[in-house]
Image (cartoon, helix red, strand yellow):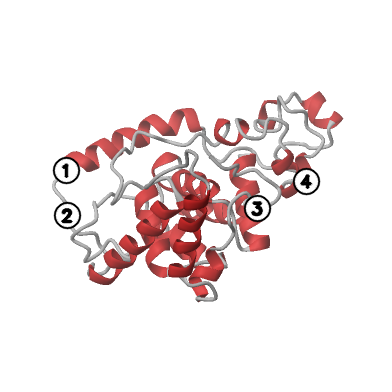
Amino acid sequence: MTNPCSLTPDTTALSPHLKFGSLSVRTFYWAIQSIYDQYKGKHSTPPESLHGQLMFREYFYFAGNFTHNFDKEAGNSLIRQIPWKNVEKDEEAQRHYEAWEQGKTGFPAIDAAMRQLQKEGWIHHLARHLVACFLTRGDLWISWQRGAKTFDRLLLDADWSLNNANWQWLSASRFFQQYFRVYSPVSFFQKYDKEGSYIKKYCPELKNLPPNLIYTPWKASLQDQKKYGCIIGKDYPFPIVDHDVVRPVNLQKMKQAYSAKTVEAEEE
């Protein structure tokens, strides 16, 4: 398992080259195989291995090519129809979406990842998982289509089929059905980076907070906020939702969506 909080690339970082064709996927596949052949020790296997990820890549290309309206809910008969909030009509949803996109949700792990995306055009695949789950079924209940548009605009390695498929996966709309597996916006990154070095780099207003507060700055007393130079609600936002409250509500809504007869979505 690679580290989504690493301050240097902890993966191959070759996805932009695969996207633009400066690296042949066949060349990459056989280069990986040559390493496996050379080192006979234990290594991961599909789907977790690099070979497995390349297989997913081809599968998503296939799905994108042969699914009508693949990048939409409306007119897509193969995707689960989930009654997400309508950002165009719901002012709170619009505020939440903008806070998520700008890295101002009040959850340092989410905000650091989105600010890295804004600044560098790339984030670790597990960071993509975290922010996608947060936007959709985990916390904000906003359609994966919104997130896919943001990623398509900001990612250096944005790829139409892969981007839309992965957003459908993380929202549990298609390809993945275990909707009850929700990423925590607090503890998920915390297990990789207890000191919060990643947070401090991309959310510098939090850089003076100690490890016990860096992921939950809203829990700091006003005295400590002054001590560490970060007033919540002024220098850094309060959380836009209460994860412990919205998570079970959203799980219930997902359960209902999975039980309901599929109805084609309306255009947003």
Tell me: residue 142, above or below residue 163: above
Which of marks 1 and 3 precedes in the sequence?
A: 3
Q: Of circles 3 and 4, which is in front?
A: 3
Q: Which quarter of the picture shows residue 236?
A: top right
What amino acid type is highlighted by mark number 2? Val
Q: Which residue is mark 4?
A: 204
Q: Give the x, y percent position of residue 190.
A: 62, 32
Q: Tell me the crowding category of disc 4: few under 14, some 14 to 19, or many 20 or more residues within 10 angstroms, Cα based.
A: some
Residue at the image point whose x is 65% and y is 33% from the top: 215
Q: Which residue is mark 1?
A: 260
Q: Label 2, secondary structure: give it.
A: loop
Observer able to see residue 173: yes
Which of marks 4 and 3 precedes in the sequence?
A: 3
CB contact under 8 Å: marks 2 and 4: no
Mark number for residue 171? Answer: none
Q: Which quarter of the picture shows residue 217?
A: top right
Q: Of circles 1 and 4, which is in front?
A: 4
Q: Does 230 sit left or right of 246 as displayed? A: right
Q: Label 1, secondary structure: give it.
A: loop
CB contact under 8 Å: marks 1 and 4: no
The C terminus sits in image quarter: bottom left
CB contact under 8 Å: marks 1 and 2: yes
Mark number for residue 263? Answer: 2
Tell me: residue 186, above or below residue 161: above
Q: CA distance from mark 1 to mark 4?
A: 45 Å
Tell me: residue 167, above or below residue 2: below
Residue at the image point whose x is 33% and y is 38% from the top: 179
CB contact under 8 Å: marks 3 and 1: no
Q: Give the x, y percent position of residue 63.
A: 27, 64
Residue at the image point whose x is 82% and y is 24% from the top: 223
Q: Which residue is mark 3?
A: 9
Q: Give the x, y percent position of residue 229.
A: 84, 36
